[in-house]
Amino acid sequence: MLKVDGIEKSYKQGGLFSKQRQQVLKKVAFECQHGECLGIIGESGSGKSTLGRLILGIEKPDRGRILFEGKNVNDRRVRRGSISAVFQNYTSSINPFLTVEEAIMEPLKAKKKVEPGMQIKVDALLHQVGLDSSYRLKYPHELSGGEAQRVCIARAISTEPRCIVFDEAISSLDVSVQIQVLRLLKELKQFYQMSYVFITHDIQAAAYICDRIIIFRDGQIEEMVPIEQLKHVQSDYARRLLTYLITFQGEDQG
């Protein structure tokens, strides 16, 4: 379904006339199958969020290509309605001047799928993410963090996409809310038969929801493993990273 083929990405460093560039992604290649949740784990600065932006077509690679169902994601028509995203910063993901109903309808308008009776569809989407119809006329500032992220998820599924990219989508939420949202995401994936690209530094979350894990290091794939083999990664770096993340999260939640 989603094929990342030899992706490279660099950014200019220094002043206006500098020719120096920092290589962020180096010949990254993998596939995400239909209905699969593919986790991407790495330290801060490893390039995983840059990869997410490339998949979403927000930025373009220097080399290589990203195909969705055989077509290049650089073409907006390929992405529109088929690939959605949920980001870490839910407060900036929703226009503060739009009601929840208007925010959920935005992607539908972009795809020109607004029809009579849309209020019923909005109510159904809210119900799917665990919110009742009273939220339709609320504004973002009236929502808790968990509620706002649920609205972002409702927006993401409104066009019934075939793939959703989650970029640290639960990391800003309280632990109890994270668990609720992860359960919700699992249910929605099964209901819609979608694929997920789940970018995170939270190994426990990845272990709960992902089918396979890609471990990122310095813009490259260090290792790729099925989730049931996560405890048996081969490289020293992967073992150290997983140990560090699990220890850090345990201390953070203690």
Image: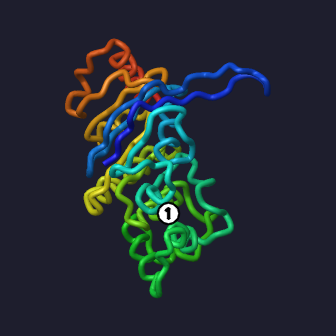
Mark 1 residue type: Val
Question: In which quadrant of the rendered image does the C terminus lie?
Answer: top left
Q: Is residue 40 left or right of residue 94?
A: left
Give percent across and percent down for residue 151. Answer: 50, 63
- The image shows residue 99, relative to residue 48, as above or below, that is below
Residue position marked by numbered label 1 in the rendering: 151
Foreground residue among 67 and 121: 67
* Residue at left offset 40%, top offset 52%: 164
Total marks placed: 1
- The image shows residue 103, relative to residue 164, as above or below, that is below
Residue furthest to the right: 16
Q: Is residue 163 visible?
A: yes
Secondary structure beneath disc 1? helix
Give percent across and percent down for residue 236. Answer: 33, 12
* Residue at left offset 44%, top offset 57%: 78
* Residue at left offset 36%, top offset 23%: 242
**Quarter residue 97 falls in:** bottom right
Give percent across and percent down for residue 61. Answer: 52, 36
- The image shows residue 127, relative to residue 118, as above or below, that is above
* Residue at left offset 50%, top offset 41%: 54
- The image shows residue 102, relative to residue 24, as above or below, that is below
Residue furthest to the top: 236
Give percent across and percent down for residue 143. Answer: 57, 62
